[in-house]
Each structure stands twice: as C-alpha cells, then as structure tokens.
Image (spheres, grey):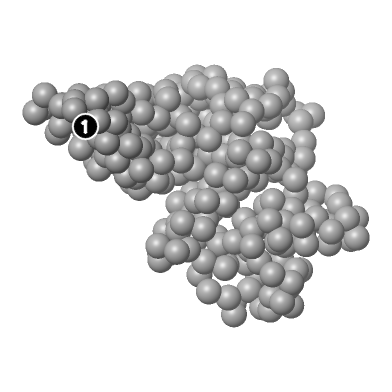
Amino acid sequence: MSLIFNEVEYTYNPGTSFEKKAVTDISFKIDDGDFVAIIGQTGSGKSTLIQMMNGLIKPSKGEIYYNGEDIWDKDYSRKKLRGKVGMVFQYPEHQLFETSVIKDVCFGPKNIGMKELDAQISAFEALKEVGVGDEFIDYSPLELSGGMKRRVAIAGVLAMKPEVIILDEPTAGLDPEGRNHILGLLKRLNEEKGITIVLVSHSMEDVAKYAHKVIVMNKGNMVAYDDTMKVFADKEIIDEAGLALPQMCMLYFGLAGKGILLPDIPRDETDAYKMISDLYENMN
C-alpha cells in the first residue's frame, strides 16, 4: 500500500473574491504500516490535506495515487477507496446517527457492498477490537460517554476492513483515561493489524510518543516530512510553524545547554528516565 501526493494544490472558491489557496505544491509518500502525524496551526491546511486523501475533495492541481492508481481517474471507484482509506472526523460522535450501536457500525460495511450477515460479523469484530462490549450493541449511540462514542465511530470505520485510517484530533475533549485508550488503540491497530494511521493532532506529546513520522504544515505549505524525532530536533521549523516542542524535547535541549548530552531525544517520560539513569550510572 502507498498513498502518494504529487505537486498537489487546493484552492477554495476559485475565481471569486473569496478565493483562498489552502495547500500549495504538496508532494509526499505514505507507505504501508506507517504511523504519520500531521501538525500545524489552525488554518495551516491540515484538514484540507486529509480530506483529499480519501477523495472527499478534488485537488485543484496535481495527482493523488493510491496503490499506484490515480484516485481521480474517470474509471476509478472512490466509493471503494473510502472502504480502504477510512476517515474519522474531529468529534466523530457527530457522525453517529443510527438508532443503535450495532446498526451504526454496520452502516459503513453495507454502504461499500457487504452483505447483511458479513456486515454484522465485521461490526461485532470491530466493536470487540475497540473495547465496546456486547452489552452496548443495542444502546443508542447518544446514550454513550464521549470516549465510548469515539470508539464506536472508529469501529464504524474499522468494520470496513480499511488499510488506512485517517483521524482528525480523535482525542479532543476527552479525559486522560479516554485519551490514553484511543491512542493505545491506534498504536495496537498499527502494530498488530498493520493498519496505516494518519493522525492530525495538536498534542506534540502524543505525536512524539506514537507517530513514526511527522508532516509539518505552515500556511498551506508542507515545511517538513521526516522521522518524528528528526523533525522535533529542528527547533527552527517548529518555531516558524508556530508550534511548541514536546516537553521531552525541551528537557533534551535544556540539558544540552548545560553540557549534559543524552544519547537521543526521549519520546516520553519513560525514555527520559532510562536515558538519564544510564547516563548517571556511566558517570559513577
């Protein structure tokens, strides 16, 4: 699997007084099994970028290829594409509309052509995968907590057997427990199921901990795309994009300024503790 953007641009309201270029000359490749985060200030082009990934909006210029096929070729099935490249929007509970959890999760699979029984089997498997028990299947989605609604929304995409899941701020508004459950679920889907994850996030801590690679957007331009800690090591790019470094990066640079050099930038507190403990032991 690969998702390729080739010199892609998108302009809203072209030819009018409201014309605005949202993204400019974007080229990148996301490979099978990647966990890619997209970061940037509000209005930097993140949402436009992900909506083009599964054909919700057509680029004004350039090509988008999925598995070697141009998704905007006249004979290409974008309905089939959306079964392979699933989208979970910000506040995905707003996507829930059926009268029961099981009906809601079945909707996507049936919409891409699964038979009723196959859709139900896939829905049950997806709900189990995200940690929603059988006792909830007949509940109205509106009766669930915020965290449970997010799980059901993700299950609705997962039931379509996607190769890629794109998520726009999936932890927004959740308490720490709900946040950790969602991020842990994405990590497991990526590592155990091999599903490619594309995550839009404003939390640099989450990005540092979970993402393999990072795309940095700034005023419609992609200003960086590289391994996560290589991107965060470039303070100038992060500063220019109006973003804050993760706390562990700040710790790394703060220690370096005092002549204490860690072997690498830690991804999280556990990494930092181990590196500092090893350094202390080697000094004694």
Q: Residue at x 74, y 72 (%)?
A: 134
Would residue 210 be seen by someone viewing this image from the given angle? yes
Q: Which residue is at 75% across, 45% downward?
A: 161
Is 278 in front, or is 120?
A: 278
Which is nearer the eye, 137 or 99? 137
Q: Would you name the residue on which mark 1 appears?
A: 280
Q: Quadrant of residue 141?
A: bottom right
Query: Which quadrant would residue 244 be assigned to in this image?
Result: top left
Residue 145 % position (x, y): 53, 74
- In the image, residue 52 lies at what x, y percent? 56, 37
x, y (%) of residue 13?
45, 41
Q: Quadrant of residue 194?
A: top right
Q: Residue at x 59, y 80 (%)?
A: 143
In screen coordinates, is 142 left or right of 255?
right
Q: Quadrant of the N terminus?
A: top right
Residue under the image location 40 percent in, 66 percent down: 175
38 relative to 151 in the view: left or right: left
Total number of numbered labels? 1
Task: Count residues near mark 1 (Cα–Cα under 10 Å), then give few for <14, some for 14-19, many for 20+.
Answer: few
Residue 267 or residue 2, whichever sits in front: 267
The amino acid type, in three-letter code, at marker 1 is Tyr
Whether residue 20 is visible here, answered yes or no, is no
The C terminus sits in image quarter? top left
